[in-house]
Amino acid sequence: MGYLFILAAAALWALIGPVAKYAFTAGLDPFGVAFYRALIGGGFFLLHALLRRRLRLDRRALLPVGLFGAVGVAGFYASYQFAVAYGGAALASVLLYTAPAWVAAMSALLLEEPLDRPKLLAVGLTLLGVLLLARGAGGELRLTLLGVAFGLLSGFGYALYYLFGKVYFARYPAEAVYALALPVGALVLLPFGGHPAPAAAWGPLFVIGFASTYLAYALYAAGLVRLEATRASVVATLEPVLASLFAYLWWGEAFRPAGYLGAGLVLLAVLLVVLRPRRR
């Protein structure tokens, strides 16, 4: 069941880009989408935690969860936007999905998860597949120093979701963690994207805030407690494959052959992780 939860979360995350284009068309900028995503998603998690009476966090957890909101939510969103600005969207997306490599390295150091050859092969196939996806989409890789730096930082921020969740979702209800972390992230993003949203953007924002944030994170948290952090991160890398499908169906965006080859490598990496027998 853990794999199904992670796959469902990846499908909902894949909606973010195609749906956000509707918000951009309505006149909202990327920082505005990031701010309202954190605000709406955090509101649903807060309501969920209150209704289920699961808004329980020890005093010791308040600071780490708050820092995660500032770094893992606001910092991740902001660094990704700067990566797009300085390096282009293609380079930013490639470096964002260095997250499995970050997770594999940090899991070995912090969570004592074994870094064996199949995991290393799956991570390598994932990164190569995402690179081919970006090239197959026609994006130009502009290797600027700031673009690379912010892109790697966004990949690191994305990896924090897996590592932080692996530790804290086993101790506290996921909705309680997100009920604090997402509003903190929205508060940090407020000066950059807190301007009023156009009326036509509220539909896409609701989809992103509810389905791609609240529901996706709830599914992801349920899957993460059942899987190793490295496995979960590689399986969730199906997101760019699904996002490319949605973009083709809704916006007519098609890949060149290299892009389809990259999608196949990502699928192969996921199968390698899923089908490999677990060690006792």
Image (cartoon, grey):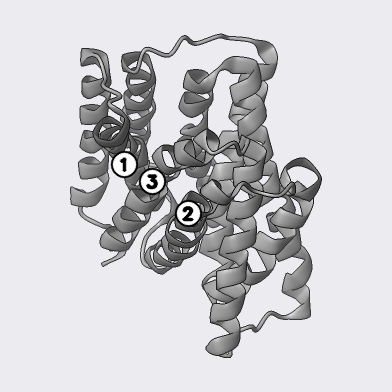
* Residue under numbered circle 3: 15
Q: Residue 9 falls in which quadrant of the image?
A: bottom left
Mark 3 Cα shell of 10 Å, populated few (<14), some (14-19), many (≥20): many
- Sequence-first disc among 1 and 3: 3
* Residue under numbered circle 1: 238
Where is residue 81 drawn, in percent x and y? 63, 31
Q: Residue 266 falls in which quadrant of the image?
A: top left
Amino acid type, residue under disc 2 in the picture: Gly
Q: CA distance from mark 1 to mark 2?
A: 25 Å
* Residue under numbered circle 2: 203
Residue 131 seen: yes
Residue 46 against residue 81 in the figure, above or below: below
Local SS, label 1: helix
Image quadrant containing the C terminus: bottom left
Where is residue 38 drawn, in percent x and y? 62, 56
Instruction: Determine whether, in the image, residue 36 is placed left or right of residue 213.
Output: right
Q: CA distance from mark 3 to mark 2?
A: 13 Å
Where is residue 12 drawn, in percent x and y? 37, 53
Q: Nearer the viewer, residue 96 or 23?
A: 23
Query: Who's the residue at 55% across and 9% down the image?
Result: 142
